Amino acid sequence: LERQPTLAGVFLGLLVIKPHLALLFPVALIAVRAWRTLIAAALTGAAFTAASTAVLGMGTLKACLGSLGYARYFLERGILPWSKMPTVFAFLRLLHVPVAAAYMVHAAAAAGAAFAVWRVWRTCPEQQLRGAALMTATFFISPYVFDYDLAWLAFPIAWLAMAGVRDGWLRGEREVLVTAWLLPLTMAPLANNLSVQPGPWVLGALLWITLRRVHGRGRRAARNSLAGSVLSTSALVSQARRSWRMP
């Protein structure tokens, strides 16, 4: 993103094959004003969509768009198993919350996740924490996410583990990372036996420890800046005193 922004956009554009996992990238890129990357991603996605349509015909594209209504119907009624969907919507529907209310709560969670990504990318220059926030928050955006999409978590888990080894572990971080690592294996059995979807809670904890690290990094930077200002002021005062004492 920093060294070759156009190439970064090309790689992001390839996520057109999994569009629900790409929804937060524009938020992050706009937050850091990465216009070249954003434009390259849009052009790449459009080019690959056009190429696939040219090869396979318009019928495939129409069928894909037409299937969205069926996907929504299956999602809302649990024909797509909620036990395998680590989303706020699935958590609420598994508790028999009405569809409209489940969508409303999910939308609120998605808005909060998007705002968190915006804030992290605006205020934190560390790419690993940016990436961890972005990829974890992605699971709060679309109600249509499956357990196999949790392979996506390998990146935030690795980045946060590296931060813990490098800077020291904070309370509860290792437990959250281990739980997130085991989530693809344990989520469906727990949901089926307990009728509670644990996915959003584990993902929320992972996002929280990321935000806590970002906040802690900001506080350390502020303290270091304040300490530097105090030292600079002290040095100026000392120099002034020496100058005053000189004949």
Image (tube, rainbow, N blue to C red):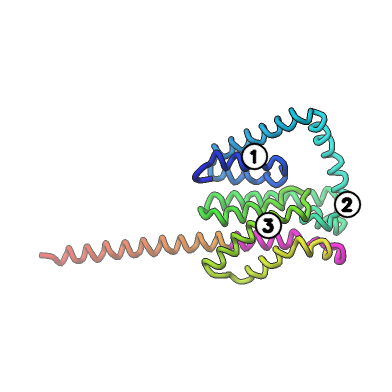
Left or right: where does residue 70 sit relative to residue 223?
right
Q: Which residue is mark 3?
A: 153
Q: Amino acid at mark 3?
A: Leu
Q: Are marks 3 and 1 in contact (CB under 8 Å)?
A: no
Q: Three-letter amino acid code at disc 2?
A: Gly
From the viewer's perspective, is residue 48 above or below residue 145? above
**In 3D space, how far apart are the residues under numbered discs 2 and 1 (Cα atoms)?**
31 Å
SS class, disc 1: helix
Residue at 50%, 46% (x, y): give it.
2
Of labels 2 and 1, earlier in sequence is 1
Quadrant position of residue 39: top right
Residue 214 placement (x, y as % from top left): 55, 59
Which dot, 2 or 3, sits closer to the camera?
Answer: 3
Mark 3 secondary-structure assignment = helix
Q: Secondary structure at mark 2?
A: loop
Task: Please give left or right for residue 79 compared with residue 26 in the image.
Answer: right
Question: Which residue sits furthest left?
Answer: 247
Mark 2: give few (<14), some (14-19) or many (20+) Cα within 10 Å: few
Residue 135: numbered disc: none
Q: Which residues are magenta?
A: 191-212
Callout 1, which amino acid?
Answer: Gly
Nearer to the camera, 224 or 144: 144
Q: Is residue 210 magenta?
A: yes
Q: Nearer the viewer, mark 2 or mark 1?
A: 1
Q: Which mark is residue 13?
A: 1
Image check: 101 left or right of 136? right
The location of residue 245, given as percent across then percent down, is: 15, 67
Q: Which residue is mark 2?
A: 78
Q: Residue furthest front?
A: 55
Q: Is residue 115 above or below residue 70?
A: below
